[in-house]
Image (cartoon, rainbow, N blue to C red):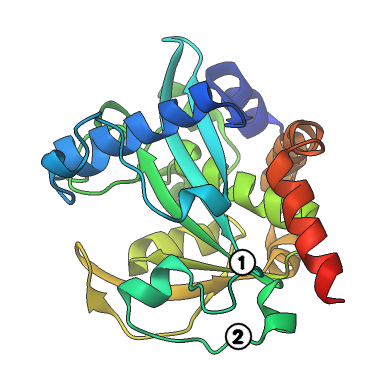
Amino acid sequence: MSSDITEHFFNYFSLSIADTPELQQEVYKIRYQVYCEELEHQPKEVFPNEMEQDVYDSRSIHCLLKHLPSDRFIGCVRLVLCNLEQSEAQFPLEEQFHHDFELTETASYNYAEISRLAIIGDFRQRQGEKTSSVSLLFFDNQTNSFSIPTERRVFSLALLSLYLSCTSFLMNLNISNAFTIMDTRTSRQLKLCGLPSCLIGDFVNFHGQKAPFLLSPTNVMNSMDQEIMALFNAIHSDLTTQIQNHPMKTRYENQILSIL
């Protein structure tokens, strides 16, 4: 089995849980750069401290992607957990797509949402993808030595790793489903990499045509080939060590125990 992808990733990148105020600020700075400065999806004046934040951050586990050669944080993603303390609390996509999934209290803890995935412009695809908040291409000349299909080579290793990090979070928290908002191309490319998802709503114009999808860790585990599984296992091992004492994990598990 070739380990080219895993070796390539860890030569260039590292993933860390943003579990301190300082690291969380790095997350918010990346989001401000991408969503406010580069894409202008959010007005700058709303965030005078140049850190893009919202009400969902306090119930989320945040992950940072660092580019090792430049020693820069270049990407982030969050997993928004259910709020069992407020039964009326929604997930971000319910608010954005004006759709109520009508989750019961006992079912809601089986769901989370992958959101605010962003990669800074220097690391997004060089040709034609600067208007996307995520990267659709990041491989160097070593790509030709990979034993992966050509169509997968144009997909972002940076983007893939952030989705794999959220899959790791879901498994560590025993959450069986995750909502996420994607365009058709991202959904198709994730499926090629062994992360299938199910379309659960209509496409709307949300900074481009996007729709809500549902991703299941179980389906992912059954879909990844050996090469992507090797990358996931390495990421999962690293993040599992980091998440064990995360206060959000403890809080979430205590919430569930209180209703069982």
User: Label 2 is placed on what type of residue?
Assistant: Leu
Q: Secondary structure at mark 1?
A: loop
Label disc, if present, on residue 21 of the rendered structure: none
Residue 4: quarter of image? top right
Residue 170: quarter of image? bottom right
Residue 174 visible in the picture: no
Disc 2 and disc 1 in contact, CB within 8 angstroms = yes
Say if 258 sits above or below 190 in the image. below
Residue drawn at the location 75% of the way across and 41% of the way down: 236
Residue drawn at the location 57% of the way across and 31% of the way down: 18
5 horizontally vs 232: left or right: left
Q: Rounded to the nearest whole Å, what is the CA distance between mark 2 and mark 1?
A: 10 Å
Mark closest to the chain's N terminus, 2 or 1: 1
Say if 140 sits above or below 93 in the image. above
Residue drawn at the location 32% of the way across and 78% of the way down: 97
Label disc, if present, on residue 82 of the rendered structure: 1
The N terminus lies in which quarter of the figure? top right
Residue drawn at the location 60% of the way across and 85% of the way down: 103
120 horizontally vs 179: left or right: left
Closer to us: 19 or 2: 19
188 horizontally vs 3: left or right: left
| Residue 58 placement (x, y as % from top left) | 52, 48
| Residue 15 placement (x, y as % from top left) | 60, 29
